[in-house]
Amino acid sequence: MRHAARQLPSWLIFDVGQKMETKVLQIDVGEDLDGDELLSALREHASELESFLVDRLEYLSVRAVCDNFEVDAIESDGDAKYTMRYKFDWSAHYGCRDANDCGSSEEGISFKYSAGVVTIEREVVQPRFPNEEF
């Protein structure tokens, strides 16, 4: 039995000429928070975190949208560095086929907490456009 190779979206394929951009999100959460207070503060900013972290779901489905974003846990990595675990549900509707698809994803990202500000940085591959390749 032959299996078809899964085609990855072009923006997921990195090559030497691909442009990268560092995106930065800073959230003022207050100073001297312990782990539980910091987790609670991040949960209060869930919509900002969702917009920053779950902005491209093409790797799941071209029609996928994020549902039910939740900050699950944080872990201290020492020296004002943390790891945040988050999860979200996603869904996609295909009107012509009258079909729905859905799933869940659990992911994590590192961040810094200093002087009352959470700073998250992530590298984003810039989309490629045909007119830029010629």
Image: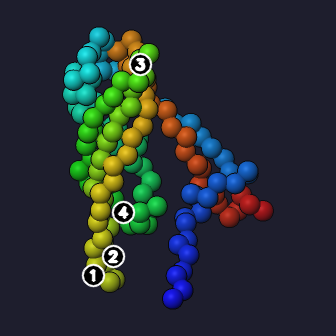
Residue 66 falls in image quadrant: bottom left
Q: Position of residue 120 (x, y in %)?
A: 44, 30
Q: Residue furthest right?
A: 134
Please state the horizontal and vertical placement of residue 94, each as a whole percent of the image. 33, 76
Mark 2 to mark 4 CA distance (whole Å): 10 Å
Residue located 58% across and 49% down the image = 125
Q: Which residue is mark 2?
A: 94
Q: Badge 1 is on which residue? A: 98
Residue 85 picture location, percent across and down: 33, 39
Category of crowding for the residue at label 4, using alpha-carbon neighbours closer than 10 angstroms: few (below 14), some (14–19), many (at least 20): many
Amino acid type, callout 4: Ala
Q: Is residue 65 above or below residue 44?
A: below
Measure how far apart labels 1 and 4 are at the Cα level: 15 Å
Is the C-beta separation of discs 2 and 1 under 8 Å?
yes
Q: Amino acid at mark 3?
A: Gly
Residue under pointer 4: 64
Q: Which residue is mark 3?
A: 78
Nearest to viewer (mark 1 / mark 3): 3
User: Mark 2: which amino acid?
Assistant: Tyr
| Amino acid type shown at disc 1 | Asp
Q: CA distance from mark 2 to mark 1?
A: 6 Å
**Which is nearer the N-term, disc 2 or disc 4?**
4
